[in-house]
Amino acid sequence: MQIIIYTLIVSLVMASVLGFLLGVFKKVFHVEVDPTVENVRAALPGANCGGCGYPGCDGLAAAIASGEAPVNACPVGGPAVAKEVGKIMGVDGSLDVKVAVLICQGATDKCAPKAEYVGVKTCAGAKVSVNGTRMCDWGCIGLGDCERACAFDAIHVGANGIPAVDYAKCTGCGRCVAECPQKILSTLPTARKGAITLCSNRNPRKAQVIKDCKIGCIKCGKCEKVCPKSCIKLENGIPVVDYAVCDSCGECVKNCPTKSLALLEQTMTSV
């Protein structure tokens, strides 16, 4: 019985000493936390998804407070969170919402596979080993690296072999863009209007483009010729649009013989 009592007394003494020492250490080594960081952190949604590019909401809050990151850096919070953080930081929190757009229409019925692929089932692996799985060397490989990278379940490779973006879920975080070895995914602002080329095939030989993909850009230049604003030019074999001038008249889209052009506002239909 005495052993138990002595043990309890010793334990209480040790606990008291340790508690006292912890209190002393807390005061001695106390680091002041910037109240701005705390306020910004409280305004963030707490998803800790990393979609902003920082290690969780704590990392983003510190970056915003220091001026390293903009007030609208949280893709999950959207305009409401950006506005609230903007108030804390004393700046405009208006958010230019972005989403991912696939710059390719090379589904399996439009762009045939080279052969049966038996390598590592990743787009990056297929790119390194056989330069892609489709006849078009610039087109979508379709093995789902983008899908696996998405933290918001917003992109899925369909039965047609190319990914489709769910714009109701997409936050424009850019993870899929970073993972795509073909560089045919891009984040674009939802407010942007105008024509876009949904093809990345830069082969200058028209016959080879037609052979590789039924819906590829054949570099005919018709879009450039019919544009009433002269805001579309062929660059490296791809029509590039000057969005400061384009008014979405749709003439280039209507006159494209392979339908490789589309209007952005129709492409991002679910936004």
Image (tube, rainbow, N blue to C red):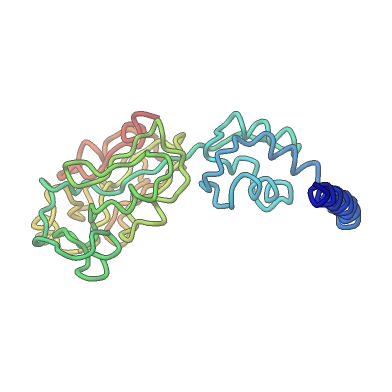
| Residue 262 appears left or right of 50 | left
Spot occupied by residue 53 in the image (x, y as percentages of width and height): 54, 52
Which residue is at a point 14% across and 58% down the rendered structure image? 209
Pick the residue in front: 268 or 59.
59
Pick the residue in front: 66 or 43.
43
| Quarter in which the C terminus is drawn | top left
| Residue 87 appears left or right of 225 | right
Which residue is at a point 26% across and 47% down the rendered structure image? 225
Spot occupied by residue 2 in the image (x, y as percentages of width and height): 83, 49
- Name the outermost residue toward the front: 1
Pick the residue in front: 184 or 179.
179
Spot occupied by residue 163 in the image (x, y as percentages of width and height): 27, 44
Which residue is at a point 52% across and 44% down the rendered structure image? 49
Q: Judge whether residue 30 can be spotted in this image.
A: no
Say if 160 sits above or below 112 in the image: above
Say if 134 sits above or below 163 in the image: below
Which residue is at a point 27% across and 55% down the rendered structure image? 200
Q: Judge whether residue 106 can be spotted in this image.
A: yes
Spot occupied by residue 153 in the image (x, y as percentages of width and height): 37, 39
